[in-house]
Image (tube, grey):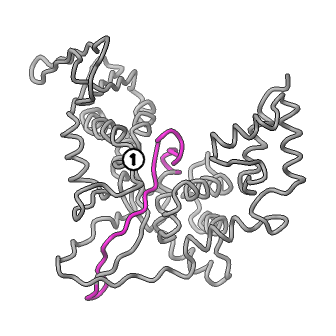
Amino acid sequence: MSNIQEVKTNIAKSGIVSVETIIKKSLKTLGEALPSHMNAERLVRIALTTMRLNPKLYECTPESFMGALFQSAQLGLEPNVEGQAYIIPFKNSKKVGNEWTKVTEAQFQIGFKGYIELFYRHQNAVSLDMQEVKENDNFDYAHGTEPFLKHKPAFHDRGKVIGYYAVAKMSHGANVFQYMSVEECMEHGKKHSKCWDKAKGEFYANTPWKTEPGSMCKKTVLIQLMKLLPKSIELQKAISMDSTVKTQIMSDMSEAKDTTKWDEKPEDAEFKEEPKPENSIVQEIVKQEAATEGDSEYISDKQRKRLLALANEKMSKQEDVKAYIAEKYDISSTKKIPVFLYNEIINHYEAIPTV
């Protein structure tokens, strides 16, 4: 078993703390921790984009962020891609000796579209139907010796969503379904998710349960459905890795210990705020984004001209490029393109057939 602490020690000795260096050092130390379809450069790009989209990840401990990143990579579910997976920052309570400490860590979560992707990798999978039920729909179902599910959506004014269901069809002919009301899904989230703030009685800001409750309800239904199906090894691993914090990097991340379930703090406990580590994610990301040709975080005029010339060859005007980067990356100007995104955007336009 290899631990990311070994990597951190090597990095500390070298004095280099960039995200790219941490990942490359991890690859050298851990060998087969990444699947064949993933390389260090791609993992760096995923890491930078993930942190840019959720700045609170900058505050997470490097080991927990790396643990979440490697879990995502091994399952082939990228964060930021159609809700397949998420890396969520949250403060956790940890007892060190006789003192309670608050520490910000990164938790890996699979989105409902991630579970759909995993279902279709199952060798016996045929189809998966997922629907929301609204209050004016004609809907009925039953379990038992003669199970059935019937759903006829209303043509007009369907009303609000009252529940969700999923139906899986397998190659041996069996149809398996699972239905849950909105209330059941939300209660499940409050009970089992680390995103629930018991003190305030609400989900933490910038977490999927807060920003995308419908998607998380669908995920909850899918997980309950998956428990009824013949499980593939990949599905078993995914369910065990979902909503975990791991600080060990292994060739099989499902075997790494989940450190999420710490002891609950007593009501009268006094907290000591844990100092941010010297090689924090904030320092790593700043260093990574500043490592450019002209000591600027944005592309040079020469790179910008090359990009616009290439786009013009593909019949895309400057306004089209601006519209593309605004929609995909939330960047307002071609002069504000970060260096670490340059090759990705160039590759996008090179892939467009010349008219």
Q: Outermost residue, bottom direction?
A: 98
Residue 337: give x, y in percent of width and height: 74, 52
| 176 lies left or right of 14 | left
Name the residue at 19% across, 39% down: 183
Residue in view at x 23 percent, y 17 percent: 137
- Quadrant (top left/top right/bottom left/bottom right) for the C terminus: top right
Amino acid on which disc 1 is placed: Thr
Task: Magenta stretch: give its range.
Answer: 73-99
> Residue 152 at what x, y percent from top left?
26, 13
Disc 1 residue crowd, few under 14, some 14–19, many 20+, Cα 10 Å: few
Count numbered badges in the picture: 1
As helix, strand or loop, the secondary structure at mark 1 comes to helix
Residue in the foreground of this view, choosing between 339 and 175: 339
Residue 100 picture quarter: bottom left
Up/down of 186 relative to 263, above or below = above
Q: Which residue is mark 1?
A: 211
37 in relation to 277, above or below: above
Residue 37 appears in which quarter of the rendering?
Answer: top right
Task: Give residue 219's quadrant in the image.
Answer: top left
Examine the structure image and report whether residue 84 is included in the region drawn in magenta.
yes
Residue at 34% from the left image edge and 48% from the top image edge: 209
Q: Given the current orientation, which residue lies at the most extreme left position?
A: 145
